[in-house]
Amino acid sequence: DYLYANSDFRILDRIQQTRIFMGHTHYPMLASYYDKTIFNPGSLGQPRDRINRPSFLVCDLDGEDHQFLRLPDQGGGHG
């Protein structure tokens, strides 16, 4: 299933992990659902959000730090 910020997250009830990394929607997302944190880095090749610049996520799992980053538009037809 695809999960977006406005999705019904109950599908995650059966997952025991507290940090969930997912993708394939091409939309960057950080969401919370009870004790779970859901990350989606977005897309380098085909961003589909309104910012329309390549996005990715850098995570330090030991320090529980994360940062969403964007690359400058290279004019290469992204999106």
Image: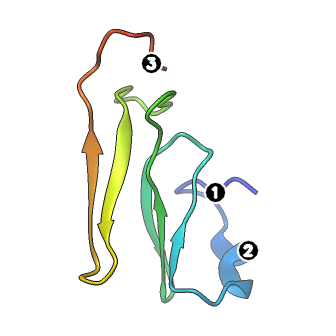
Q: Residues within 10 Å of mark 1 (few under 14, many from 20)?
A: some
Q: Are marks 1 and 2 in contact (CB under 8 Å)?
A: yes
Task: Identify residue type, mark 3.
Answer: His
Task: Identify residue type, mark 1.
Answer: Leu
Q: Which mark is residue 78?
A: 3
Mark 3 to mark 2: distance in Å? 31 Å
In the picture of the structure, the residue carrying the numbered disc 2 is 11
* Vertical comparison of 78 with 62: above or below: above
Give whichever of discs 3 and 1 has the lower sequence position: 1
Q: Residues within 10 Å of mark 3 (few under 14, many from 20)?
A: some
* Vertical comparison of 50 with 33: above or below: above
What percent of the width, then of the height, locates residue 26? 54, 39
Q: In terms of secondary structure, where does tag 3 sit? A: loop
Residue occupying image coordinates x 64% and y 71%: 9
Residue occupying image coordinates x 32% and y 66%: 59
Task: Identify residue type, mark 2.
Answer: Ile
Q: Residues within 10 Å of mark 2 (few under 14, many from 20)?
A: few
In the picture of the structure, the residue carrying the numbered disc 1 is 3
